[in-house]
Amino acid sequence: AVSPEATVSRTLVDWIVSLPWHERTAGTPDLAAARTALDAEHHGLEEVKDRVLDYLAVLAMTGEARGPVLCLVGPPGVGKTSLARS
């Protein structure tokens, strides 16, 4: 018998493997557009939105995303996925 946890783990691994790891988008981030999108989609969460914009600003200045990554952590339903999509 296969446990539900094994199915969840398999789904996660399949999803991670399917990500386009070697694809990049062209150009530098538009910080004004990013702020507008984040504000339009999410009320509050100012510290989180500021951190995302800080990350994008460093990326825009350096042209590369080396160093720390953004990790959105919290209980279900707080907006992690929708924030990442924005």
Image: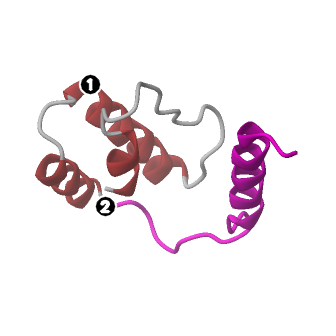
Q: Which residue occupies 68% across, 64% down?
A: 19
Q: What residue occupies the far front of the structure in this picture?
A: 1
Q: What residue occupies the far right of the structure in this picture?
A: 1
- Where's residue 83, x and y in %? 33, 46
The image shows residue 11, relative to residue 5, as above or below, that is below
User: As rendered, which of 27 and 12 lies closer to the eye?
Assistant: 12
Instruction: Answer left or right for 76 relative to 62.
Output: left
For badge 2, the amino acid type reads Asp
The image shows residue 31, relative to residue 25, as above or below, that is above
Q: Which residue occupies 79% across, 42% down?
A: 6
Spatial separation of the CA atoms under disc 2 and disc 1? 19 Å
The image shows residue 18, relative to residue 64, as above or below, that is below
- Where's residue 43, x and y in %? 11, 38
Q: Quadrant of the C terminus?
A: bottom left
Marking on residue 47: 1
Marking on residue 30: 2
